[in-house]
Structures are given as C-alpha cells and as structure tokens.
Image (cartoon, coloured by chain):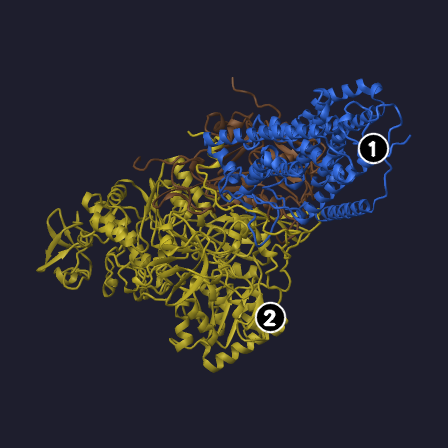
Chain colours: A brown, B blue, C yellow
Amino acid sequence: MAAKKTSIPHHVMVIDTNRCVGCWSCAIACKQVNNEPLGYFWNRVLTTAPNQSTTAKAPASNNMDVPWGTYPDCELAYLPVACQQCNDAPCVKVCPVQATFRRDDGTVLIDYNRCIGCRYCMAACPYGVRIFNWGDSNYAPGGVVGYGKEYSTEDRLVFTPERPKGVVEKCTFCVERIDVGELPFCVEACPLGARIFGDLNDPDSQVSKLVNNGGGEQLHPELGTDPNVYYLPVARRVPGES
Amino acid sequence: MATTTAAIPVRATRSYRPIWAWYAALVVLMAWGLAAWIDELRYGLAATGMRDVVSWGMYIFTFAFFIGLSAGGLIMASSAEVFGIKALKPLSRLGVLSAAACVAVAALMIIPDLGQPFRVGNIFIHPNWTSPLIWDILIITVYFVFSIVDLYVLQRHAAEPSRWKTVARVMAYVGLPTAILLHSVTAWIFGLQIARSWWNTSLMAPLFVVSAVLSGTALVTLLALCAQRFGKVELSQETRKWLRGFIVISLFVDLFFVGADYITVLWGNVPADRSALNLVLPGGPWAWLFWIEWIVGGVIPLAFLLVPRLKKMPGALGLAAFLVIVGVYAFRIELVVLGFVNPLTQFPPGNAVGTYNVQTSSFQLIGRYHPTWVELGIVIGLVALFAALITIGYRALHVMEPSPAAGHRHARMPAETKASS
Amino acid sequence: MSKFSRRSFLGGSAALTGGLLVADHLRFLEPSTGDLVSSEEFLTGKEVVYRTGHSNNCDGACGHLVHVTDGRVTMVGPASWGTTTVAGEQAPTFHPRICLRGLSQISNTYSPDRIKYPYKRVGARGSGKWQRITWDEATTLIADNFKRIQAKYGKTAVWVAPYTGSLAVLEGVIGAGFRFASVIGASAGDSEGDNEGDSATPAGWNYVLVDPTNPSNAGGFFTGHESVDFMSAKTIVFWANNVAETSIPDWRIMCDARDQNGTRLISVDPRFTVTCAQSDEFVPIRPGADSALIDGIIHQIFQNGTYDAAYIRANTVGPYLIDPRDGTWLRANKVITGAKDDYVVFDESDKKIKAAGDPTLKTPAVLGTHVVAGLQARTALQALADMAAKYTPEYTEELTDVPAAQVVSLGQIWGSSKPLAVRVGFGLSHWYHGDLHMQALLTLQAITGNIGVHGGGVTTFAGGMAATIAPFDLFDFWAPKGTKIYTLLEPMNFCDAVEKGDPFPVKAAWFPIDNFAQQMSDRNRIRAAMEQLEFVVVSDYSMTATADLADVILPACTYFEKTDLLSSNNFYLQFMPKIIDPLFESKSDLDAIRMIAEKMGYGEYFTETPEEFLKQIMKIGQSDADPSVRGLTWERLTTEAVRLNTDPMPYVPFFNQQYPTKSGKIEFYVEMLLPYDQELCDHKEPIEASPTNPKFKQYPLVFLSTHTKFRTHSQFVNLPWLKEINNGGDGFLEINPRDAAPRAIADGDVVRIFNDRGQMKVRARLTESMKPGVVNCYQGGWDTIRVKHYIEGHPNNLTHQIAKPAQSLIPNFPSNAAYYDVLVQVEKSGA
C-alpha cells in the first residue's frame, strides 16, 4: 500500500548541479524577494569542480568561473549554497535564546524579535550561510522590493523586509510564500529548472522520487546535520556513447 | 613576628598622589571605552572589524582570555588550600579577588559583542539548555557569586583564622572544580562545534584549563609583584619558587597540548584540517601568532624561569609572567580568529561579508579581520575597569596584608610596619 | 557516486593565496558608499501585477510579471506563456523564463544613474558640462538643427540610428525612429540591428538559402529553429555559442534534450566555457578556423560515404553540373537541344545528360564528372568533394589545432547521428569570414540531410526574423503613405560618410538607445568621426559613452514606463503595457519623436497612440494580416502572451523543403560568389587574426571580447547587485597562464593590451579556460566620463571596421564589424 501523505509536509529542495550553469539568477532572485542589502547573500553560487572533487590542477585564479585542469582538459561546475535547513541543525542547538528554531515542516527560521545578535549560530553553521546585520545597510536603488511585508508563523516574526540592526538572517525557504502554496522564489526563477521543491512526505512528489531513489546527496553528510537540501550530482556522459 | 591575637597591624592607607593619577588614567580609559560603546550602539557592529566571515573578534577572544585569567586565579588560590601549598596561601585572597574582577570584566565584555544588547534579558526568559552559551552564562553567574562569597570568607578567615578554617577549606574544595568547570564550559563553546575542525577537538577543555592555570597564575604573580612594588609587601623566595613552578609546569603542559595538536594535524595532513594550521605556521599570514605563542610566550619566559643566570635577574619573574600572559592572549586570538579565517568552503567567491563597500569585494574566500578603534576602545576600557577593580579591591580589602592566618609567616613584614599596640 | 564529504566540500586543494597579515591600518568604520536609498516604507498598499516582455537587447525575450504597489515596481518575476496559438492550436510546452538581469531590472529603472532631464552641452564635446533644459527647448533645438543641417547638406545628412537597446516594436530596432527618418527624408541605420557584428553569418545564410535579388525576399532574411525543436535532435553542436551563459533559459531545453532523450551535446569554442563544461564533448578550436574544421568534417563525410544522397538529390544543387570553364551553372538551353533554361544533371538510370526539370529524370548523379557538350562537367557535390579532399585530418589539425583524431570522430558523428542540430552564436559572425563559416555549416548540414527537418538546421536566433519581423507590416509603419522610405546608411559606413561624404555627407546623428560610441568597433575612429558631427542627439536612460558626446540629451524611459509590443524569438507576442509613469522627465521615444516631428512640420505622421500604431502594424482585425497573426484580437493580445501561428510547430524553417533561392534548392555552391572566390566553403584565414598575417609577430594574441552573463551588452552594467558578483564591476583580461608567464604577468596584475588602433588597460585574470594564444576581455563595460569599468580604454579601441565586399550581395546584411578578428599584444603595465 502506498504511504499516505501526512498532513504536515516535510519540505525539501533538490538542486540539480548537472544543469546549474552558475548564472546567479537564484541568488539575485533571493535578493529581490527578500529585499536583501548589498553585501548580503542568503544564497550564493560557488564555482567548483564537478562534485567538488577532482585531481585536476587547481584553478589558475581564485575567482568565479575559472576552471580546474589544463586547457583543453578543463573541468567546471557550480554549487548554489544557501541555508541547508538541517533537521539536526547546529544553529538551533546553540542559539542561547531559541531565536533560531526548526518548524515542523523542516524549515529553520529566525525570530527577528528575539535574536540578541550573539552570532553563535554563525560560528556553529558548517555551511557559512548566515548573514549578520552589522549596521545600517545599503540597498540597491528602488526602495523596498520583494515580498515587502512582515510575516509571522507560530507567533514568531520570521520575515520582515528590513531586518533590524544586530540580528542574523538567512534563507527561509521563502516561508511566507510556501505557506500559501507558492514555491520559493529561487525555484521559480531558476532559468534552468535546476531547483525542485516539494514535500518529502508525499511519495508522488518529484522530490520524493529524486531523494528516495538515492539520487540526491547532502553537503557534509558526515556531520550528521541531515540537511533538507539535496544535490543531484554532476554526471557527464562519456563521449562516444550514443 | 606577631603571633599574638593583638589587633591586626593595619597600615594606614596613605594618601598617595600617584594613586590618584592612576585612577584618573583608568577613568579616562573607561570613559573612552564607554564612548566607544555608545558609538557602536549608534552604528551597529559595523563599527568593529568583524564581518560575516570572521564574525567573532576581539570581544570574544578577550572574553575567553579573561575567563582563563579568572579561572586560573581561583585554581591557584584553591590549589594552595586543597593541596596545602603554604607558600601560596598569602596570595589566596589576591587570587580570588583577581578571579572575581576578571570574571566580572569577562561577562561585561560580552555585552558590546551583542547585536541587540538590550534584549539580553531573553537569555533568562527563553534559555536554550542545549546551548553552551547558556551553560557558560550559568557557570559564570555561579562562579562570580562564588568568588565574591569566597572573598568574603577568606577575608573573615584572615581576621579569624580558626573560626573560618573549615569554611575556607570547603570553599577551596568547591572552588577548584568550579574554576575548572568554568573554563571547560567556555572551551566547549568552541570545542563542541562540528562546523569548524580547528575547534572541534576533545583537547579543547584540557587545553583551556591548562592555559587558564598558566595565565591566571601569571596574572596573580604580576599583581603580587605590583603589590610588592607599590604596596610594600614582599614575596618570599618560597612563594616565588611555587609561582615559578606553577607557571613552568603549566607552560610546558600548555605547549605540549598545542604541539600535540599541531603534530596530529600535520601528520594526518587532511587538507581541511591543514588549511587552518597553514595559516598560522611560519610562512602563513597569521604566523606572527605562532611566534608570539611559542617564542615570546614560550621559549623566552621559560628561559627566564629556568636558566640560572636569567632567573637571578631582577624582574625575571615579572617579565616571564607578563610574556606568558601575552602568549596566552595570542593563543586566544589564534583559536577564535583562525576558526573563522579558515574558509568553510574554499570555492570562489567564498562567503558574503555582510556589508557593502565599492572598493572591496562583497565576498571573502579567506577571512580578514583586524580590530577597529571602537573594539580597542571598549576592550581597553574594560581592562581599565579590571585594573580599577583590582586596585580598589586590593586597597580596601588589604588582600595581601600580613595576617595571623596560617602561612603568614611566609610573608615578611616590611621594616617600617607600624605596629599598633 | 562521490560523497560530499567535508574534504570534498572544502576543496581538493589547499591552495590558499593571500590573507590579511597584521592590521594594515585601524579604521573606524567601513566607509559607506553614499549612492543608495532604502525606503523605510513596507508595502502596505494594494498590489497590482502586470505582464510584460523584457525588451532590453536580449532575444531571450523573457516574460515578466511585474508587481506594482503604490505606483512603484516592487518585484519582477517570470511570467508564464499562453498555451495556444493565434489560431487556437496547442502550443509546445514553454517554461517561464527569467535571468539575473531581468531580476535586477528594478534597480535599473530606479537607478541613480538615470538621466532625469533633457540637457544641452555647454562645454566642448565630451567635456561633460551640461545645462538642464526643458523638453520644449530640447525638441526645438533638435528640430531647428535638423532642419538647418538638412537644408545645408541634404536631407540624408541627418542620420537616425535606433539600435538594439530595445527590441520592442515601436521603439527599438524596428521602431518609430525609422518612421521618423523616412518622414523627414533622413538616412537611418540598421533596422533589425545586425550590422554591427551580427550580419556576417546572416549574409552567409542568405548566400545558401535565399536569393537576395528577388524582391519578395525583401533584401534577405534570417531565421532559425524554434528552441523546443532541439528536443528532437540526436546530437546538438554548439558552434561558437555559449548558450549556457548567453541564452541561459534556452540551455534548459538543451539539458532537457540531454536528460530526457539522451541527446549528445558537443561544443566548439576556443574558450572552455560553461557550455563546454556541460557538453559531452569539447572541441578546442583555434579562433577563426571554423570553416577549416567544417571542411575537415566534410572531408570525413565524403571519406566515409555518409552524405545523404537522397536528400542531396531532392533538396540541394548537389547534382547540378558546373561549367568547367568559368564555374557557373551549366544551362540546359545552352548544352541540350530543345531544352529550356534549366540546370543540367546526369541521370544515372540511363546514363544521359538531362535538364533538371526533365520528366524522364529518375536518379540524378550526385557525384562524378560527366561529359556535356564536350565539357568535363562536375556535379556541384563533386566540386565540393574535390575542394574538401585536401582537408585531411592532419591538415585540418594544422589549420585548427583540433586533434586529428577528434576531427575523424566528429566526422563519424556528423555522418551517423541524425538529426543533428547546430546552434551557432554570433561569436561566429564576429569574424571577417563569418559569412563563409555559416556557408560552410549550411553546406555540411545540407549534405548530411539536416536542413528543414525537426532536430536539425543551423540556428542562431530561435525563430529569427520569422518571429520578430514577419508578423508585422513594418514597411507601411516605416514609410507612411506620402513618404519615401529612409535612405539606408549602415553603421559600418558611418565613418566614411562623416569623414569623406561617401556615399553622402552626414553632419548630424540621433542615437535612440544606441551606445554607438562605445559598442561599435574601431572606437577611436568612431569617436573621431563623432567629433566632426555638427549636432548629436542621444536618447537614453543612462549616461552612456555615447551620451557623453551629445549636444542634446533626451531622457528615455525603461520598458516599465511605456506601451509597446515585444515579438521575440520564442514565437510569442508579448504586449508591454505602461506599468508606471515615466520617471522624472523621461519620455518614451515615440513621444520624443512626436514632439520633434511636430516642430519640423511632420506631426501628422505621429498622431496615433502606441496602441493605434500597434494595431496598424499588426493589421489587427484585417484579413490581410500576416498569417502568423491573422485573426488575433486586441483583447487577446493584451491579456496573454500569444503564440504566433507557425507551420510547422515547433517551427522549422524550410520544413517544406522549398527554398527561396534561384534554384529553389539549397545552394551550397553559390554561383554569385564566384567573383569573390567563395562559391564553395573553402577555408580562408581570418583577415587579421591569423598566424599568416605579417603583423602576427608583433601582435601574437587573438583578442576576443565576448559576452558575460552579468551584463547585456552595455546595459545592466552599473547595477550594484550585478557588480558585486562580477568583480566589483571591474573588467579583467582572461589570459592563459602559458601566455602570462613569459610576460611576467601574475593574477591581478594590471596589463596593457594594444595594437595599431588603440589600447586599453585592465587587470589580468589567469585562467585555463582560454586557449593559449587567445585572450578575452568581456565587452559592454563602460568607459564614460563618470564611470569606468576598465582601468583605461575599452575593448573596442582595439577592434576594426574592415568590411568584406562579398557581403554587399545581401542588401540587408551588407557589412559587418568583425569584433573578434583582432590581434593584440599584452604586456604588464606599470600603472
């Protein structure tokens, strides 16, 4: 008998690095919908070797888009990284005031009204995905953009268009959008269709199929953080096969 | 030496012009620190040199430093009682005073590090018991209260030794593990974090404890030598020997621990672990920390503590104590900062930094940090506070006055003591 | 599958460089940038969402959902597409699309760089001294000066040059600027915007597939396969096309083909781009050697016998016999008694020479030399085979640097993997012999039976002019009744016109959304020519290098602020409503044109509203509307993105195998190119960037200036979101370490790039993505008085305007700026 879809979803995102071209559209989409100041990237795209592992020569320059290897035998891939929304999140464990908390659907959120700005969560995060509001922020021209309003869940203020000075912020899986049935904006914006979002508890969802078939891998699985973000690996076909 | 129960010869505290100059200087520094903090409140933590990659800086490593000094002071003071080291007993109260002042300053050091300091009450309303920060706040509170009580007890004990002997003993037995626990919990703030391999070692608590003993004892030594210089008390050779011994042994153990950690990482040669170590080894961008820890705070003080010709030089002990403290401070910097400078990911463009400046990149592969005047101001202000607390406490409580308590005979009365009778 | 262990996430090497040493100085605060605004106002008003198309110089033509609250645009996201055609047929699935630039559009529209008011120059040209004036004053100035100059030097002395800054119908590269030019009798630049580097390959396309002398071909056109058609391909070859970076949403379709259908992806490029990284095979070709490689593959096709004889017979001039005396086609009426004027073939079934239209013809021979009236006449295919005979794998390797074994393998694939689609970028057109490269590609695709079939073809624009021009009646729009069409003066001829009056003097120019003085090649020459103009008008929304040289600046609108229509290469019509009021005093180009026309006495031609113009152009409601839009109502057009009617669907040009050539067939043998020695695609070395060039010793590096995902030519260049992920907006030179090392250039060093025409300076970025001997500096960055993205100069200081005579055969694509056909030297610079 097929597993029944339970009422509380388990939100996961799957990112296909086999087709991510490092265009940063997801990162810019995130900046827009969350009204992020300059210098802040909840989501960023790293230039890597395929599957972050290679014996080829290191890039000649420590900049984006510079490949590994020696021309013409080069290798290049990309890895978008935002909050991994860990099921066993170190940040949740260390926050002294429980401002960072995990919701039942798997999203890890920050209560902007409670955060004291100690930044222990930033020290504890193995992925370096948390941003701190160090001071007055500079924004791109145009005024408040994106969702533009406050949003609370479980009585906690988890989104506000201008985060106060002295609190930490990070990707929220676009909690204010997914709670009304929309997709996270990076998923909607990705021009490659490289991001898939859905409910792991639903066996018919695309994410279920991808994750449960063993196709998705987590970052730093050895740390046991059990992220809700999975990556489909780069798979290059051997030339000559039809 | 007076062994009677005559009234304690209390030396009149002289009105001493230099002391007012001292206080005035401290007040200026504290005022500067306060002004710096007000500026920081206005501009936010952007006024510091911290950014998203190196998100903890001077406040945190100085906090850890002061916790270590505090724990060490109490460990030394309690050890004197617990292990019956008579030569160190005259320094007990000074040690506890130092511990209390250090931990108070350490606790205050955290406040300017908070982005939302006025929400600090949330810690008490919504504590998260899985967080080592909460454990640390708990132990700091307990410890501070304990050290105040201990100071009181020892004051009473100095006045009425026999009556307070047992209580003093009990305090020492409680104090020693409490102090060890204090710095272990502080160590666990870092050591339990799986995110950063530079921190994530079981060695962290033992290493912190031994460096606490090292720096705390050195601090008490320095304070005692200052008392000797300005307060007209004198340390006996026996006391000096024990102090020297504590410092030498804890320095050796400290360097041994650090060295063992280096060897483990070097031999294993796992790139993720090596990349942090490479930053600090000679040739790396933070190698100056290496030299300070091992030479300035290691080989040189050892020389002044062990080499007979150097040992005899006047000020050798004081110099060694001072250098050791510098070395431990360098270690705190190395611990905290390198944990952040070493990239979590070595793929470009790295981490976003969290502020925008047209002239520099919004990303860093390798973290960059140097403190700003704001951070220096606040830290120096708090150090000045520490100095003020010690000076006031020392003078008000006469923590090194000779007393009828056991061990007093090791402190020689200055020639000009006016005995009141 | 590999695990993402801590080790691998952190990187395979511990090669760390740099790092802060001791505090360099103690500073109080991070200096803040100034510029920027933040609104404390959260969005509390009512939100309205509009659908529009992104017309900023990109043929991706994404559909945008634009959120507006309280009259301010607050969010831009991808819009979905209508699911049926004009006629009601089910359209192929087409995903919503957007990229980082569309997502940044808000900061483009609201940029502090916006030109807010009209200005007139008060200092020397280019000195940056301006005086704010009113629109009335500005338009009067313009009208008066245009009238004066036209009276003094002739009507065509005013040159109107709208360009691809906007691709929308009314105000872009097919827009009202041309109507204005016609109405006032002026000359005008390049409609459809190809002749600054994008017309060589279209010219080549026309040589083979279109008869340019036939008036019904309107001077030549250019089209391609619809993007989703690539799903049918067994193999896709990206020839000089960095799709994954320059046409990002189209790469999705290629990935779908790969993942769902097992399509093989091959990328031919001198640079190892992200497209190459994601392809199954990378072909590292020497820049400009494309026709040599293609000839090498053609050689393999003949060697392996994998040419498609049936297809060649049916659809190409392959069987037609060539007169050995002069290379022209043998004419049947000259060599066969009683025959009409026709091509001549050899029928294999009865071994007779016949006219091509002979009803008894069964099997025309595709190969061989046949005796006709005493002449040894080869078939065109035989001529091709003979030409290709010298392109052995070894010789091809010599010319192209592609390993011989790979040439053989490519030949094998091309002959056996069908259908095979070629997607070719304009990178191929940035060469003097770009036309020849395209001709060669079409030749290869023709002999392998890949033209006019699903999953085949040679495509640059997915749809090309079939989607962007055909649906509209542009001729009546450009030359309204009572007026004559403007006189054409291509951008490549601008300098001669200004400097020498050849073909006629030009003394004034108007550049509406055209960054001519920066983006055109041989920039130093262009700027010198601009100095000689008496009057320059620039309409733009940002202060470009061209605006720097203006006499009058008119503030223009961005696409949120005006009504227009976008018809794009994805075959959808996207109505573009006016979403917000024009910012500051900006006006749409149409409004500006109207004001000036009125003052020149031609206001009667501009009384229509944008909606009225669009209805006229599309012949809404009229029975003689183009079949692609016939029956479309205004209501429908303005409520959803409507897919054009196409046949077939997905669109494949020449699906019916009817070619608008003289012969009605694919003419890979191009008789009209005989005078240019290009009747076949025999490789020719680049005009400049060739090792055979004597200048090569002095300037041994090929200089490319390719597109980057962070910009769209010179738009989006100064936006903070995009600059902070693009090296702070600073340009850099991509150079291989093997070229950098002998020049003692380390990563980050300032270098000087120079040749006889000019120089520039930027920092070097060492990368193995560059083929040794080739360097690249991304184009589009600004070199203006206020803003410089290169330390000194601009890539176009190094490019040239050497025009290829053969292209003059195609009226619509007569000249081409060969941006990549350039040699330079690079040296470390002190400063």
Quarter of the image containing the N terminus of chain C?
A: top left
Q: Amino acid at mark 1?
A: Leu
Q: Relative to C600, is B144 above or below?
A: above
Tag 1: Cα neighbours inside 10 Å, few (<14), some, or many (≥20)? Answer: some
Q: Which mark is residue C773?
A: none
Q: Does mark 1 fall on the same chain as mark 2?
A: no
Residue at the image point whose x is 61% and y is 27% from the top: B249
Figure quadrant of residue A124: top right
Q: Say which chain tag 1 marks.
A: B
- Residue at 38%, 44% (x, y): give it: C276
User: What's the chain of the residue with tag 2?
Assistant: C
Q: Amino acid at mark 2?
A: Tyr
Which residue is located at x 31 percent, y 56 percent?
A: C288
Query: Residue B397's mark?
Result: 1
Q: Nearer the viewer, residue B263 or C206?
A: B263
Question: Which residue in the structure is indicated by mark 2?
Answer: C119
Is residue C136 visible in the rendered image? The answer is yes
Where is residue C515? Give x, y as percent: 49, 64
C393 versus A49 height, above or below: below
Badge 2 density bin: few <14, some 14–19, many ≥20, Cα 10 Å: many
Q: Residue furthest left?
A: C374
Name the secondary structure under disc 2.
strand
Res A85 → quadrant: top right
Tell me if I can see residue C78 in this picture.
no
SS of the residue under disc 1: helix
Q: Nearer the viewer, residue A134 or C498?
A: A134
Residue C252, relative to residue C669: is it above or below?
Answer: above
Query: Is C116 left or right of B11, judged from the image as shown?
Result: left
Which residue is nearer to you in this view: A113 or B369? Answer: B369
Q: Is residue A185 left or right of residue B419?
A: left
The span from disc 2 to disc 1 (Cα, nearest Å) is 79 Å
